[in-house]
Structure formats: structure tokens, C-alpha cells
């Protein structure tokens, strides 16, 4: 049961960090980005749990002695195919975890928060949130998020 508890703890931690980060907006976007980055714990923990389940099934599920050789080979091949499919899906996702899993969520949250912000954001701050390639900021990876947040925070942070 310890692994289940660890997965639950990681998911809970990621969700808590997301809501803490979200609460920092709109006044403290730089602090929000730091907290929101821990959202990656949620899909990461779920991916780890899925991989663990596949491994457990592979270890625990043994064909009966009465099964034919062909049936045993087929079951082994089917399990290998499912393992390969899920591994490919999650490994590819993990490669893009920062920009894909976290960056997309932060981008959407920033754009929703600052879309109708009053008073309206300056052109620089709007570009930091809504533009690609502005001042070399491309994508919503970790460094780009930090840079975008700094630009916005310089304008919106209470003095």
C-alpha cells in the first residue's frame, strides 16, 4: 500500500501547489509560476502508477499450466505490446512534461487571468502573456514562464 500512498501524496501535492500558485495571480505572477511548476507531479505520478500496474500485471499474471504454448506466447506478446504502447505514450509525454504538461496549464491560466485585467496591461506585459517570440520568449517552458512572469509582475505587483 505504500506505493499507492506515495502516488496519492504526489497527486495531492501537485494539486495543492497548483491552487497555491493560482491564488498568487494576478498580483504575484513570478511566485505563481514557481508554485504552478509543481503541477507536473500530478501527471508524473499517474504515469508512474500506470507503469507500476503494468509491471505488477506482468509479474503476477502467469498463464495456467494447461494453456497451449501458442496461448502462452500470445499472452506474453499482448502484455509486451500494451507495455510498449503505454511506455511510449508516457515517455513521450515526460519528454515534453515541462512545456506540455505544466507550460500549457500555466499559459492558459495566465491568458485567462490577464485577458480582461483592469487596468489594461501595457503592451510589453500583454506581449509577454499573449505573444510568441517577443523578446526571444518562445513557448511556455520553465525559463520562458519565469521571464514572462517577471515582465508582468513588474507592472501588476502592488507597490
Image: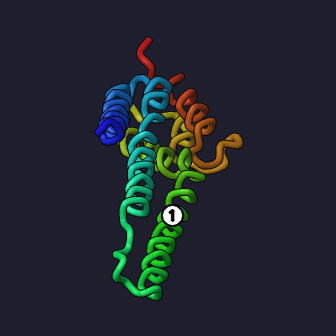
Quarter holding the C terminus is: top left
Asked if residue 22 can be seen in this view, the reply is no
Q: x, y percentage for residue 85?
A: 50, 70
Q: Answer with the quarter of the image where residue 35 lies.
A: top left
In the rendered image of this protein, does residue 99 appear above or below residue 36?
Answer: below
Q: x, y percentage for residue 135?
A: 69, 40
In the displayed structure, does residue 25 sit left or right of residue 93? Answer: left
In the rendered image of this protein, does residue 145 appear above or below residue 76?
Answer: above
Q: Answer with the quarter of the image where residue 134 lies.
A: top right
Query: Of residues 119 and 109, which is closer to you in this image?
Result: 109
Q: Residues within 10 Å of mark 1 (few under 14, many from 20)?
A: few
Q: Disc 1 on helix, strand or loop?
A: helix
Disc 1: which residue = 89
Query: Of residues 79 and 117, which is closer to you in this image?
Result: 79
Q: Answer with the quarter of the image where residue 61 lies.
A: bottom left
Asked if residue 95 can be seen in this view, the reply is yes
Residue at horizontal 38 percent and vertical 61 percent from the top: 57
In the displayed structure, does residue 6 sit left or right of residue 138? Answer: left
Residue at horizontal 28 percent and vertical 39 percent from the top: 1
Query: Of residues 52 and 26, which is closer to you in this image?
Result: 52
Q: x, y percentage for residue 124?
A: 58, 36
Query: Of residues 16 and 140, which is closer to you in this image?
Result: 16
Amino acid at each position: 500500500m505504500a506505493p499507492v500512498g506515495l502516488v496519492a501524496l504526489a497527486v495531492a501535492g501537485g494539486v495543492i501547489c497548483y491552487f497555491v500558485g493560482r491564488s498568487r495571480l494576478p498580483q504575484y505572477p513570478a511566485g505563481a509560476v514557481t508554485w504552478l511548476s509543481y503541477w507536473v507531479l500530478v501527471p508524473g505520478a499517474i504515469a508512474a502508477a500506470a507503469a507500476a500496474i503494468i509491471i505488477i500485471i506482468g509479474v503476477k499474471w502467469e498463464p495456467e499450466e494447461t494453456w497451449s504454448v501458442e496461448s502462452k506466447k500470445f499472452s506474453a506478446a499482448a502484455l509486451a505490446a500494451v507495455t510498449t504502447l503505454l511506455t511510449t505514450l508516457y515517455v513521450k509525454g515526460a519528454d515534453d512534461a515541462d512545456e506540455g504538461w505544466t507550460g500549457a496549464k500555466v499559459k492558459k491560466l495566465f491568458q485567462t487571468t490577464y485577458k480582461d485585467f483592469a487596468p489594461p496591461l501595457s503592451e510589453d506585459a500583454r506581449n509577454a502573456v499573449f505573444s510568441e517570440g517577443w523578446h526571444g520568449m518562445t513557448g511556455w517552458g520553465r525559463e520562458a514562464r519565469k521571464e514572462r512572469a517577471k515582465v508582468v509582475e513588474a507592472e501588476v505587483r502592488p507597490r
